[in-house]
Image: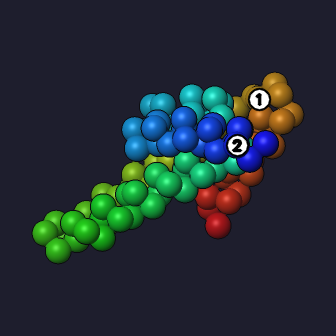
Amino acid sequence: MQIQLRNILREASVAIPGITITNLREFVRQYQSQIALIGIQMVWTIKLTEALERNKNEKNIMDVKRKEIQAINDELIKMCLEEIKSKLDRTKVETLVTIQVH
């Protein structure tokens, strides 16, 4: 099971740097809860790292990255408000929102 999870995470990690608002829904639907959560947290880490590295040269980069992260949160919230047929999928999205907000 650990090997399978590692393989799935390796596959998902290729898509993680390219996650945007437009393909976030597909990423969440495509992967299990653990993988989707790790992916969203990795996106958060990437954006924050970029902001910290570029903060000396670009004074408003923190605000830009904060808005990008907030857009991801907003998209997850929108997904939660939609009708989701599968109880498992609803639980996944609600869990992602709860963890991401906190």
Query: Is residue 70 something that shows in the picture?
Result: no
Q: Position of residue 6 (x, y in %)?
A: 64, 44
Instruction: Kindly give the residue lying farthest to the front in the view shown.
Output: 3
Quarter-wise, where is residue 87 in the image?
Answer: top right
Which amino acid lies under the numbered mark 1 shown in the image of this protein?
Answer: Ile
Could you tell me how far apart the alpha carbons at marks 1 and 2 are, in whole angstroms?
A: 30 Å
Question: Residue at coordinates 79% horizontally, 42% vertically from top-left?
Answer: 1
* Residue receiving disc 1: 84
Q: Position of residue 89 (x, y in %)?
A: 77, 34
Instruction: Kindly give the residue lying farthest to the right in the view shown.
Output: 87
- The residue closer to the viewer here, 51 or 83, is 51
Question: Residue at coordinates 63% horizontally, 29% vertically from top-left?
Answer: 30
Query: Is residue 13 something that shows in the picture?
Result: yes
Q: Is residue 102 above or below residue 40?
A: below
Quadrant in which the C terminus appears: bottom right
Q: Earlier in the sequence, mark 1 or mark 2?
A: 2
Q: Secondary structure at mark 2?
A: helix
Which amino acid lies under the numbered mark 2 shown in the image of this protein?
Answer: Ile
User: Crowdedness of circle 1 by 10 Å Cα count: few (<14), some, many (20+)?
Assistant: few
Q: Secondary structure at mark 1?
A: loop
Question: Residue at coordinates 55% horizontally, 41% vertically from top-left?
Answer: 10
Res 3 label: 2
Q: Position of residue 27 (x, y in %)?
A: 57, 34
Question: Residue at coordinates 74% horizontally, 47% vertically from top-left?
Answer: 2
- The residue closer to the viewer here, 72 or 33, is 33
User: Which of label 1 and label 2 is nearer to you?
Assistant: 2
Quarter-wise, where is residue 12 in the image?
Answer: top right
